[in-house]
Image (cartoon, rainbow, N blue to C red):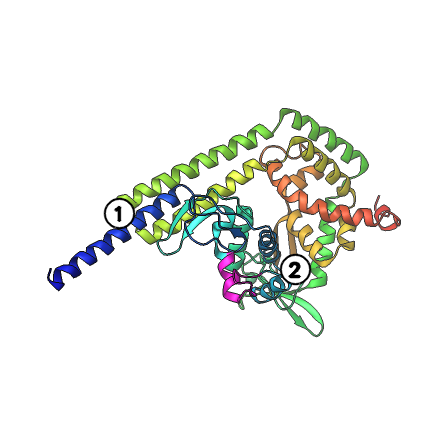
Amino acid sequence: MSANLQAVIAEDYIFNLREEARKGLYARLKQGLYPFKAPIGYLDNGKGAPKTLDPKYAHLIREMFELYASGQHSFRSLHKEMNRRGLRNTKGNPLCMHGIETIMNNPFYTGLIHIKATGQTFNGIHKPIIPTALFRRVQDIKSGKCGKKVSRHNHLYRGLFRCGLCDAPMSPERQKGRVYYRCQTSACDTKTIREDVLEVAIIGQLRTLIIDEDEARKLKLQWKKNQAISNQAEAIQSLELRIADETKRLKRLTDLLIDGVVDNTAFQNRERDGKLRLAELKEELANLPDPATEEANHMKFLELMKSLAELHVLAEPDEKRVIVQNCFSNRTVIEKDVCLEPYNWLREGQLGSSVCVGAHLRDTSRTIIPLLDILHGKQSGQEDDKGPLNRLS
Ligand SMILES: [Zn+2]
């Protein structure tokens, strides 16, 4: 055989081998199996079996996502903290910064398999370590889409207020020992506002949301009555509709690719986003609070609403932020005026009309839980000294 022909055969042979291997890998991926080395936090179990959680590291991976999502860490400080907590790579060495970034970018931890080289995303059959919502939150913080990036100065209301005239963010700055928030448009009529002025406005507005014993009782009754009609079924139905929509959109996306309307890169990006969104909706459906917990939470919250403003005064800085974020949907500064618009469900509570119906119920369950955690902790801490809480009523 001529050397030339040998080379051609060899080339063909290698090509076929590659083709076979590629098909084999693809088949596994389609089954939801990851045919490569397990990412940190998972263990290998042979080619035909899904990865399982590594009892040594899986919880540390979850902690790492949670720490970053808290907004209190940069990659650098997270890197330090995770090495301190004992996270190691497969060789048993401390992770490098790049290793941390790789983990934070990998949707494998939510149950998806993303192949970077081809851009494809598959539904894995391995157990997720973190909820999709947490993963998406981390992606948003990384890309700066949500204002909770770590700043060197942890100013109290950073990222929470916008200018009501030009919609620019009101950014904190320190001047002569005082904190000011400044509209970022230099020609705007809104200039700066002092932090203590904001604080007074917030407390004043919270005071208007306070309800008395009588109103609380009325609202509780009303809420129970509305609950009897049950919004749970409505919430389930709405989520199921959104899941169906998202599934349809993903199918349509494939058609768009086949028809050449979108190119491969656009397709892969949109597919990955779509699959993440879908997973998040499914999680939301699976985690809908049961009506009994929901009711208990509402009753507790209505109790706390009797002293909302006082609780804010006593709150730690991080807690104040949660209170402001969760009570007011719109937070703007217009020249020297502070405008705080309470969420509908809070306002309706105050007016004594029907509280928490339909869509508001869903708003409420999302916002009420972190608030309850904080406010309730504060209140029980104050049990020995009822002074500041009682002064209001
Ligand atoms: Zn402005």
Q: Name the residue that disc number 2 marks.
A: 157
Relative horizontal placement of residue 52, taking residue 230 as reference (left or right):
left
10 Å neighbourhood of mark 1: few (<14), some, or many (≥20)? few
Relative horizontal placement of residue 7, taking residue 229 as reference (left or right):
left
* Dot 1 amino acid type: Gly
10 Å neighbourhood of mark 2: few (<14), some, or many (≥20)? many
Residue 345 higher or lower than 54, as above or below: above
Quadrant where the C terminus sits is top right
Relative horizontal placement of residue 106, taking residue 336 as reference (left or right):
left
Residue most extreme to the front: 1
Classify mark 2: helix, strand or loop.
loop
Residue most extreme to the top: 229
Q: Which residues are magenta?
A: 88-104
Residue 274 higher or lower than 92, as above or below: above
Task: Where is residue 228? Give x, y as percent.
Answer: 66, 25
Task: Where is residue 303? Give x, y as percent.
Answer: 77, 39
Task: Where is residue 112? Give x, y as percent.
Answer: 46, 47
Q: Are marks 1 and 2 in contact (CB under 8 Å)?
A: no
Q: Is residue 197 magenta?
A: no
Instruction: Give the numbered dot on residue 260.
Output: 1
